[in-house]
Amino acid sequence: MSIDTAVIMAAGLGSRISEYSHNAPKGFIPVAGQPIVERSIEILADRGIRRIVIGTGYMASEYEALSSRIRHVQIDCIANSDFANSGSLETLLLCTRDLGCDFLSLESDLLYDAAMIDRVLGYPFPNVVLASGHTGSGDEVYIQTDDRSHLVNLSKDRGSLARIDAELVGICKLERSVPLAIDAWLSRNGHKRPVGFHYEEGLVGIARSLPLHVEKTELTWTEIDTLDHLARANAVIWPRIVSASGEPA
């Protein structure tokens, strides 16, 4: 079955880039004159995504206004009212509670080669965690896999992993069963909602019972969490994306 739904997690405070986030959520940081979340929406719509659920929190009204401006794709905003005390896993679970279908998940603060979405949609696995090689970004989430390229563990702490096989990008393809499996994992381990975990921790929590294929790509991307990330995005990442994809500069 083709996927026509995506979830964008966008509830965070963006406290590490307050020079921008005090005026708008992180997804509205502009690169090449366009907010990065709007670019994501355009990329998704161009690839057959017809419904996008945005998990909001901090300055949620900005996303509500965005959803009313964009007409070519259905955008539903679901608020995480406890965003300041919970994590992105709570936002993901809220967004997928009544979804009832397989979906893409993305972080709102990503600048990436549009071909990444093509690759994720095209991989012949029901659950795909997109990864890359070494980026040198300074805020890497490292991934450990098994010999079948299934997720085993991930962490920002290199020393906590038995080996490092890739870095997390922040784009996934997930079956409708994944949120239910995560919710069950939380219950088994005594974690009450709302939870303070990152969504990645939820994926690790179910990885032993539900194979999550880690696919490594060499396509260009970056997250934008700090001013240094933004400077690198403008000076290094965006020119590479334009050069590789032919997007207008």
Image: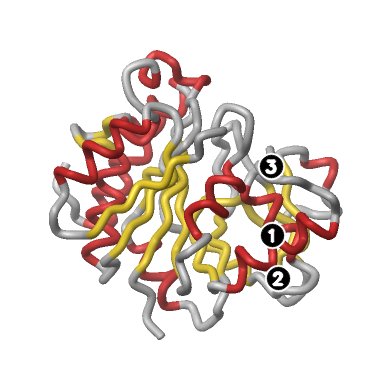
Residue found at x 56% / y 33% = 82
Nearer the camera: disc 2 or disc 3? 3
Quadrant placement of the C terminus: top left
Residue found at x 56% / y 63% = 216
Which of the two labelled residues, at mark 2 and mark 1, occupies the earlier sequence position?
2
x and y, in percent, of residue 193 in the image: 69, 45
In the displayed structure, would residue 75 be above or below residue 34? below
Label 3: which secondary element = loop
x and y, in percent, of residue 88 in the image: 57, 43
Q: What residue type is labelled 3?
A: Val
Q: Which mark, residue 183?
A: 1
In the displayed structure, would residue 40 be above or below residue 63? below
Which of the two labelled residues, at mark 3 and mark 1, occupies the earlier sequence position?
1
Residue found at x 64% / y 67% = 180
Residue found at x 68% / y 48% = 142
- The answer for how far apart the CA atoms under marks 2 and 1 are is 21 Å
x and y, in percent, of residue 10 in the image: 44, 40
Along the viewing direction, whichever of 167 and 90 lies nearer the viewer? 90
In the rendered structure, the answer to whether residue 39 lies left or right of residue 60 reads left
In the rendered structure, the answer to whether residue 165 lies left or right of residue 163 reads left
Which of the two labelled residues, at mark 2 and mark 3, occupies the earlier sequence position?
2
Circle 3 residue: 195
Q: What residue type is labelled 2?
A: His
Circle 2 residue: 150
Q: Which amino acid does label 1 sit on?
A: Asp
